[in-house]
């Protein structure tokens, strides 16, 4: 597969245009510490002869990232237009590059309509990629997001039915797309999130005793307050990387319960391996996930991981083999923490198995081959 795909990219120059998530810019990636992780795939595709263009929602300041993205063309809102107008006119404003492209790809469903309009205008094939199922996540996030879930279902149906391929990150997402939107299974491809396993790896660093780690948004969807409450009375240090609406509430709860919490805010992606390696356990106790990159990165570093027995997490953790599952309530989380802290040999075994699992399933080289295969299928008459 790899040889045939590579040869195809050499015979006919493939020009791939990636449409960013609505409202997201290169600066957004950079500020959130995600820049290097997000661009790694496209740098690797360049090495296979793919010409890459990014269409972002940033202003002209996004053009300053050209030095960090050699060979990748950056198209952005250099006119400073209001966001809604830019989104509406995007297929025309960037028309010259879009007309010359071979194929369009979305990064997430939110913002994919701009790619769909461009595909119809310029008669190009569309790969509708989504790292999480927007409608399903919103539907599981409480009554306040039900209108959003309905809106997302409308967008997903529109885009998925028009796309030549739908790319999702898990088999559960594929089953949801096929059943919810009556899609042919042959049009829905699973390509998991990748891990930079040459960056996230165990290096022999001794973790700080009783240090726990969480990386993610500090919002209700990640269940961070239950995690803080679970640490009460354990004498642990909880390092939390990320920002969000619950930051102040987390600090207040930690002070009230006497929990040692370090709120580090967003960190560069390249700083995360050291933070992980210095921790004894990584935790992700969300009630619902898509295909969580931070969990996989922790596993790649050889950490023992505790995850909630919830969709998107339970598919990645084999309980007692590659990690430890618990409930989403603070009592269940606390019991899992106590169990693993008391059993260092089990933690080491879980970490070794987790690293092996990630190498086998989520290393970047494997994902690149899958991406190239989809491009070949879409572009082959």
Image (cartoon, rainbow, N blue to C red):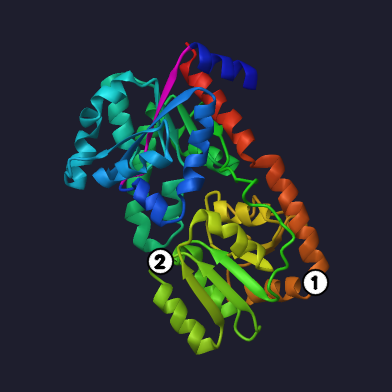
| Magenta-span inclusion, residue 285 | no
Residue under the image location 32 percent in, 25 percent down: 119
Q: Secondary structure at mark 2?
A: loop
Tell which of 165 and 215 is nearer to you: 215
The label shown at residue 71 is: none
Q: Which residues are magenta?
A: 12-22
Mark 1 lies on residue: 343
Q: Residue at x 57, y 14 (%)?
A: 7
Please rate how many residues cluster around mark 2, counting C-alpha atoms within 10 Å: few if below 14, some from 14 to 19, many from 20: few
Depth order, front residue of 31/323: 31
Q: Circle 1 sits in a helix, a strand or a loop, which is it? A: loop
Position of residue 262 relative to residue 204, above or below, is below
Q: Are marks 1 and 2 in contact (CB under 8 Å)?
A: no
Crowding near the residue tagged with mark 1, few <14, some 14–19, many ≥20 C-alpha atoms within 10 Å: few
Residue 244 numbered tag: 2
| Residue 124 in sight | yes
**Residue 355 left/right relative to 217:** right
The quarter holding residue 233 reads bottom right
In front of the other: 78 or 367: 78
């Amino acid at each position: 597969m790899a040889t045939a795909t590579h040869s195809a990219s050499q015979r006919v120059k493939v020009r791939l245009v990636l449409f960013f998530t609505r409202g997201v810019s290169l600066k957004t990636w950079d500020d959130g510490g995600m820049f290097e992780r997000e661009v790694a795939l496209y740098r690797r595709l360049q090495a296979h002869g793919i010409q890459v263009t990014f269409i972002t929602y940033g202003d002209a300041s996004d053009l300053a990232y050209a030095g960090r993205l050699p060979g990748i063309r950056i198209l952005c809102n250099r006119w400073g237009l209001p966001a809604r107008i830019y989104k509406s006119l995007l297929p025309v404003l960037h028309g010259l590059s879009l007309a010359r492209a071979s194929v369009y790809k979305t990064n997430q469903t939110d913002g994919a309509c701009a790619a769909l309009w461009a595909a119809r205008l310029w008669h190009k094939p569309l790969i509708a990629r989504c790292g999480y199922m927007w409608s399903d996540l919103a539907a599981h996030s409480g009554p306040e997001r039900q209108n959003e879930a309905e809106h997302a279902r409308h967008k997903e149906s529109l885009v998925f039915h028009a796309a030549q391929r739908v790319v999702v990150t898990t088999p559960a997402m594929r089953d949801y797309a096929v059943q919810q939107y009556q899609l042919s299974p042959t049009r829905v491809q699973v390509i998991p999130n990748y891990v930079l396993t040459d960056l996230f790896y165990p290096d022999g660093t001794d973790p700080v005793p009783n240090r726990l780690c969480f990386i993610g948004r500090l919002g209700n969807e990640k269940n961070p307050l239950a995690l803080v409450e679970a640490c009460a009375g354990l004498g642990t240090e909880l390092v939390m990387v990320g920002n969000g609406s619950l930051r102040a509430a987390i600090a207040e709860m930690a002070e009230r319960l006497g929990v040692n919490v370090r709120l580090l805010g967003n960190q560069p992606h390249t700083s995360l391996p050291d933070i992980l390696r210095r921790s004894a356990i990584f935790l992700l106790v969300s009630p619902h996930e898509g295909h969580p990159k931070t969990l996989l990165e922790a596993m790649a570093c050889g950490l023992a991981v505790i995850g909630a027995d919830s969709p998107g997490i339970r598919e990645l953790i084999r309980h007692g083999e590659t990690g430890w599952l618990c409930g989403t309530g603070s009592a269940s989380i606390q019991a899992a923490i106590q169990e693993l802290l008391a059993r260092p040999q089990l933690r080491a075994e879980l970490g070794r198995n987790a690293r092996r699992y990630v190498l086998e399933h989520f290393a970047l080289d494997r994902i690149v081959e899958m991406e190239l295969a989809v491009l070949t299928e879409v572009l082959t008459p």
